[in-house]
Image (cartoon, rainbow, N blue to C red):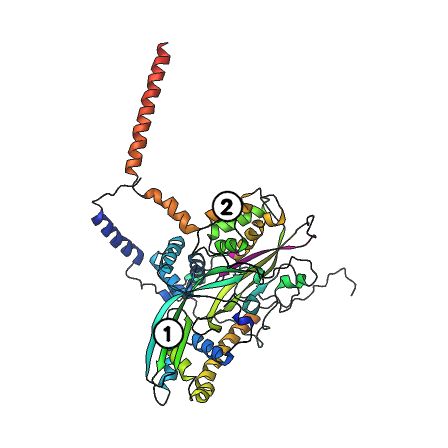
Amino acid sequence: MYVAVKGGEKAILNSHKLIAETRRGNSERPEITIEQIADQLGLSVDRVMAEGSLYDRGLAALAVKQAQGDLVEAIFLLRAYRTTLPRFAMSEPIDTAKMLVQRRVSAAYKDIPGGQVLGPTYDYTHRLLDFALAAEGGVGMPEAPVADEALDDGMPHVADLLDYEDLIEPDLPDPDQPEAFDLTREPMSCPAERDQRLQNLARGDEGFVLALAYSTQRGYGGNHPFAGEIRMGEVAVEIVPEELGFAIDIGDMVVTECHMINQFEGSADRPPQFTRGYGLTYGHNERKAMAMALVDRALRAREFGEVAKYPAQDEEFVLYHADNVEAAGFVSHLKLPHYVDFQAELSLIRQLRAEYEDRQQKDAAQ
Amino acid sequence: MSHASKHEHPNPARARWMGIFARASAADLQKALDGLDAVPAYEFLRRPETGLVMVRGRSGGTGNPFNFGEMSVTRCAIRLAEGVTGHSYAAGRDMKKAELAAVFDALMQTDRRMTLETGVVAALARKQAEARALKSRKAAATKVEFFTMVRGDNPL
């Protein structure tokens, strides 16, 4: 129970002023700009957009600045802002096969049509602190090499190579599928279909999804996965405005996509076949995309007649705890005044304590 | 609506230029407008407004659609003094750009079309294609060229 308490106005006002000053930091140094955050802390911005579930680099960068770099707080700010905007349209499903590829690797096949393209990755760096970045003059303007030829247009998905041999389950649209579940319009509901789970995981907390994915690898519901393909790049976003009645591109968005290929021994009515786990995130974030693909596959346990024994296979557990706005809100609410609650608990414990001491004295007297 | 793109497009030329204007910068569109012999008179049918598009993905990239997440978008509609209407939808929150894109969409439906097509539209399309090609060529420079190591015990 919460009770309205008066008297804190001035303290709150001054607290706002103190946080503003703290956020600004040392006033002898220049203030950081939104553009600098969007450009130079781009991966933080990607994460905030993904879990804030709003693709807008400028707004996400503003949220990062306002939250003093606290990404979960920034995600909250972005989620709150999106509720102020009207929805104009649903997009056509993005076509990741037509991506302008910036990075594309497969751990399942060495030679793939279009090739293994490393792109901008930290994978092959030494992970030693680079003091050149801390040097007085900064790093200047590093320039990346430019190949003579662009990459092939429209690289095929690696999973589709297995499709030709019928060695992987097909993933084709079901014409009878109802309109996809929308968590922004409907409350969570279980049992959940894959559309609801994918939306939940796409905006789910990276740390939570990563830990669940890790648990499947350590034996809590594993499916012996291979990273069939990870790709990152720009895809076109297409809508059909009602007043026009035909499809137009409104721009592009950067996404990271992961196809995990998983072992499946087959069942009475299914042949042994590889199965799929799918991950898709805003921006460049393959840790999240890979983790999402592992958890997506784990959550398909029911579909494959697997016994759901572990947390990552338990959709109620996963779906209800993946959202860090809800999780942070519920944990943080313990900071709110619970004075009356606590007074009640206090008198209860005093009463129990008195009764306990009475009993002790009686026992001693006997 | 969701099947519209699978059928023959009713207006591929207009969709193409609207996509080009949506991807252009407000500065480039303003420069293009200033470059016209006469700046056209127009009124708003819908002032620029920012909202959301729910972007959908597909499971496995090919399967059933799911709601991936939202994206900001700004739209605008204008009518030229001569009566032609223009529309725009552009990702992001740039109101000026949405306005200019709508003006150019209208102009492209007038007898200025041929001049604009070979001038403004061609220039914007070229700039966008060059930017894409440069990104792709930088990625291509990181393509792995595998070679097989010859082991000492392998007969040559």
| Chain letter, disc 1 residue | B
Q: Position of residue B101 (x, y in %)?
A: 40, 78
For disc 2, the marked residue is: A316
**Residue at left offset 48%, top offset 77%:** B15
- Give the camera-side residue of A300 and A128: A300
Q: Amino acid at mark 2?
A: Glu
Q: Which mark is residue B5?
A: none
Q: Is residue B28 visible?
A: no
Magenta-colored stretch includes residue B33: no
Residue A28 lies, in percent from the top left, at 28, 61
Give the structural element (helix, strand or loop) at label 2. Answer: helix
Q: Residue at x 33, y 17 (%)?
A: A358
Q: Quadrant of residue A159?
A: bottom right
What is the secondary structure assignment of the residue under circle 1?
strand
Which contiguous range is marked in magenta? A264-288
Determine if marks 2 and 1 fall on one subunit.
Answer: no
Q: Magenta segment: does it hold A276?
A: yes
Q: Position of residue B104 (x, y in %)?
A: 40, 81
**Three-letter amino acid code at the position of disc 1:** Cys
Residue that numbered label 1 is attached to: B76
The extreme front residue here reads: A176
